Image: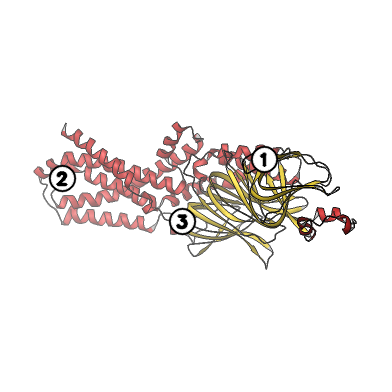
Amino acid sequence: MKKYLLLTTGLTLLLIFSGLVNAKVLSHTASLDAKIPLTEKIILSGEIDFSGDLVGATLENPIKKELEGTPDEFIPSYPFIENIRNVDYFDIIPILTERYTLEKLNEVIVFNLSSFGNQTFTNVSLTVENEDIFSVIAINGTSSVSSKLDSTICALMNINMEGGNVTALIASTVDNSTIKIHFSSSISLVGFSPTGNSSQIITIKDSNGNIVWNGYLDRGNIIIVNDRDFFLSYKSKVKFLPLSYENGEVKFHIKLSPSETVFDASALLEPILEEFSKLSGRDSTNEIIKSMETFKPFISSFSPFINGALVAIGENLTLNIDGSTQESKKILLTKGDFIDISLLHDEIENKNYASVNGECSLIFLGDHLYTAQAKESENGVPPTIIPVSMILLWVIAVIVYVLFKFFIKRDVNEILTEKLKKPAFVVHILLIILAFILLDMEISYQFGSSILSSLILLPQGSNVSLLSIGMIAGLQLSVWSIGALVFSLPIRTIVNSLLSYFGIGKEAKGIDKGIGALFIWILGTVYLKIFANIFMMILLSSGIMPTSVFG
């Protein structure tokens, strides 16, 4: 009875302790410094915190063009007219939503280019409802955005818009989260329609929320925002942010980290496919849909693995990892507690690229995982396959066994051994459970998933596939089995020899089993990626390539 009471008490303390222990202390993080051209397909998944400038296509001033040929004496001398006529070009910022709002505007003018009639409203807000998927706002100044998405899948890619290449951030969320864009502009145009486009419904409200103007824009009407500093906000599951036009200057920063909410990649992918299917038929959107459909089978099944991950697909990339030069083959996948991504412009090469920096728990280079123990190896496995440290451990175990078996012999203390028999059994069970939990935590940190974390997610309805559970369970149980043979056995031999020196017999051998189990966690964590790379070598030799997932 005492044995079971002791076991129960110990197990309770163990569970409390394992919840407080930071098992990541043994997991090696690699310092990554990479320069990825934005011509690559770059996918980010997890939580992103981003800020920077937006850049739109350049448009010749449509109002100035419309007024050409009209004598000055027939054009009213309104200050806003003079401001517009002094502007040669506007930047067109596309807004991917059916509804957006401009908040706290000092002055809004509804102006007709033909009759020069106008209505002026002060201290108002303006809402645009659009029948098309895209709206645009024309500005003569700058626009920027700063926001945070708790759970998203987003892409950084080049797409073709209006005959030009645009580098854009396209983010998908499961809810209609709000995005705010800050504009600093001398004059701005909303819903301009010199040709009579009536696809947008404009609503202007005063500070009390009363509608002061509402309706479609008639032919020749434009909405002028005469405010140098204002915000545009909209709610949408899909966010489209243009960052650079025709490889122009790009200034944007993204901080990527694992999402702390339930991360379901399949649910996140649906909104972006749904929105861009509305634009099917255009080359740029067809390319987006094709790319996302390519990723869907992978990211839907492996949500836990890619939470907090950056994936770059395209050409081979040269990377700096822990000060050594490494090369990724077609695919780069990296994840950690956070990854900093700065989008910059290389003036010499006239190209945009993503500067990626972070302390990474996992770096997949297309055909193997980066490991500090085998950084010079092309497949992430030491030349000897079995690390030298493992061989030394066995040599030490044999020496200690021979020394204490034949040269330093002590008689067994039967009384002491009997006293330690039951406590040794309890220690044995508790240390095995502790070692398994800690190893599970290490695997979860490094790979994003483990046996216990997968079992926890299943009742929550998360999209965890049996394939992903099977793969991680196979790796985890293989590490445990190999660790029991390669690490635990020599450690048990050393501990048993030392215990025999103090007169403790084999009946109390649970102590050595428990300590041996702890070394499965310690050494298994250190060599975890090497085991994974050996597993991948077997797959590669069988003709199964990880890159084949992406064609």
Classify 10 Å Cα crowding around label 2: few (below 14), some (14-19), many (20 and above). many
Q: Quarter-wise, where is residue 173 in the image?
A: top right
Q: How far apart are marks 3 and 2 (CA)?
A: 41 Å
- Marks 3 and 2, the one that precedes in the sequence: 3
Classify 10 Å Cα crowding around label 1: few (below 14), some (14-19), many (20 and above). many
- Residue under label 1, please give it: 99
Q: Is mark 3 on a helix, strand or loop?
A: loop
Q: Which of marks 3 and 2 is in front?
A: 3
Q: Which of marks 2 and 1 is in front?
A: 1
Position of 187 compared to 519: left or right? right
Q: Distance between the residues labelled 1 and 3?
A: 49 Å
Say which amino acid is labelled 1.
Arg
Q: Is the C terminus in the top left, top right, bottom left or bottom right quadrant?
A: top right
Q: Position of residue 108 (x, y in %)?
A: 71, 49
Res 457 visible? yes
- Marks 1 and 3, the one that precedes in the sequence: 1
- Residue under label 3, please give it: 371
Q: Distance between the residues labelled 2 and 1?
A: 78 Å
Say which amino acid is labelled 3.
Thr
- Marks 2 and 1, the one that precedes in the sequence: 1
Q: Where is residue 249 in the image (x, y as percent from the top left)?
A: 67, 62
Q: What element carries label 1?
A: strand
Residue at 23 percent across and 40 percent down: it is: 10
Q: Position of residue 410 (x, y in %)?
A: 12, 52
- Residue under label 2, please give it: 505
Q: Position of residue 395 (x, y in %)?
A: 30, 57
Q: Which of marks 1 and 3 is in front?
A: 1
- Label for residue 439? none
